[in-house]
Image (tube, coloured by chain):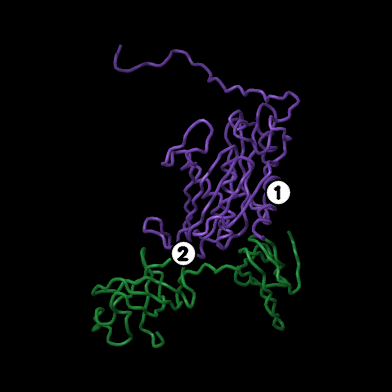
Chain colours: A purple, B green
Amino acid sequence: MDKYRASGPEGTVRPIMKVPRPLPSSEGARPSGRGMDQFRHMFLKTGVITQASGSAYVEMERTKVICGVYGPRLAAQKHQSFEKAVLTCDYKYATFARKGKRAGYIPDQNEKDVSMTLVQALESSIFLDKFPKNVIELYVLVMQDDGGAVGAAITCASLALASAGIEMVDLVSACSASQIGKQIIVDPDVDEERNQTGGVTVARMSSLGQVTHVMQTGMMDLRATSQALELCVDGCDKIYHLMRKALIE
Amino acid sequence: HHTSFDMEVVCVIPGQRLGSTTEYEAGPGTYVHNNFVYSSLVGFTHPGKPQPGQKTVLTVTKDTEPTIIPEIGSVTICKVTKVNPRFASVNILCVGTKPLRETFQGIIRVQDVRATEIDKVEIYKSFRPGDILRTEVISLGDARSYYLTTSKNEL
């Protein structure tokens, strides 16, 4: 009997799945009074950071995201690629952005993952081979996260890239949907996100009708996932129209 | 999102469908996908004058200064920052007549300084730090800088 190793328990037990708290209103309306497939009011503006090549600000009621684009500029040696430009992203929550916990100054693992997500969602929408040896840098700051910050960041970054005059295939809009119990709700706020059993975020180029990125978390069955994806695709198309208005003005 | 227009100047966004490739040809600021010409910039469309027998060329230009980077063959204005027996380091300030927002790095190797007697070139006698030069880009060069030349007659 070796005393150096700790042996595990003899039997096995299934993990306890998080039981979602039911939505406060029993008729199925959301606490904020929105409908199941109703998006929050969105405000978009470009040209908010004058020293950047391009910039944009997106606000969905209480979620506020700002993005600055620098570039195309000469890349440092480690980033370089001879055939096309490199897109980098630095996604950060402001220290006061999240409810309850203070974000640190150094990007943590979650922020680094979201940075990679942003690069994946936007890379295919830019003509990177027009700028070899260059780097296009995105700096995204979430000033307040009331749900849907990643989707708002993708939309904001795409608007900033367009306002910088970088040649793009299409604008990318993004939104998310959550499953709580049996309900699928669109554009969840932070309390709904915390309570979700599963969620989906979709980034889409609406004019070409192509999805650039899908992210699914949690536990969702096939029917719920396909319904959430369809709702998100419709939402992305609506956001595309708002982006278009913001750019033309 | 399909809009058709005859000789109008319209404000467009990236991904907006401009016309079909049977009537239009893709100019700067646009691209072709599935037999349609789409815009790739936020800006105004400029339909070109139609040549007989050819299609109208569609161009999209932005109202702000376009992003330019040095390309092979482009004439640039540079300022010398460092000299060394093998090459001179420069900061590329303008491409053509347009100033760059952020300077790029370039080098002029000793064999690219002039067309004749290239083995007898002494860099220090040709260039000094602070000199402004007109050069042409010969290649994208290595990791850090573009390769430039001053050996042509017009430079």
Residue B84: x %, y % from top left:
25, 72
Residue type for callout 2: Pro
Circle 2 chain: A
Between disc 2 and disc 1, the foreground one is 1
Taking the spot 65% from the left edge, 31% from the top edge, the residue there is A179
Locate residue B151, reporting x and y percent. 35, 83
Q: Nearer the viewer, residue B109 or A52?
A: A52
Nearest the viewer among B27 and A174 is A174
Q: Residue furthest top?
A: A1
Residue A61 versus residue B150 in the image, above or below: above
**Identity of the residue drawn at 73% across and 27% down:** A28
- SS label for mark 2: loop
Q: Is A76 above or below relative to A94? A: below
B93, A22: nearer the viewer: B93
- Seen at 39% across and 88% down, the residue is B153
* Horizontal side of residue A138 vs A198, given as left or right: left
Per the image, the residue denoted by label 1 is A238
Q: Quadrant of the N terminus of chain A?
A: top left
Where disc 1 sits, the SS reads: helix
Task: Specify the quadrant that holds the C terminus of chain A.
Answer: bottom right
**Three-letter amino acid code of the residue under disc 1:** Lys
- Chain assignment, label 1: A
The quadrant where residue B25 appears? bottom right
Instruction: Say few, some or many: other residues with alpha carbon within 10 Å of mark 2 (under 14 / 14 to 19 / 20 or more).
Output: many
Q: Earlier in the sequence, mark 2 or mark 1?
A: 2
Q: Where's residue B110, x and y in %? A: 28, 78
Mark 1 Cα-neighbour bin, 10 Å: few <14, some 14–19, many ≥20: some
Q: Residue at image x 68%, y 24%?
A: A24
Residue under label 2: A132
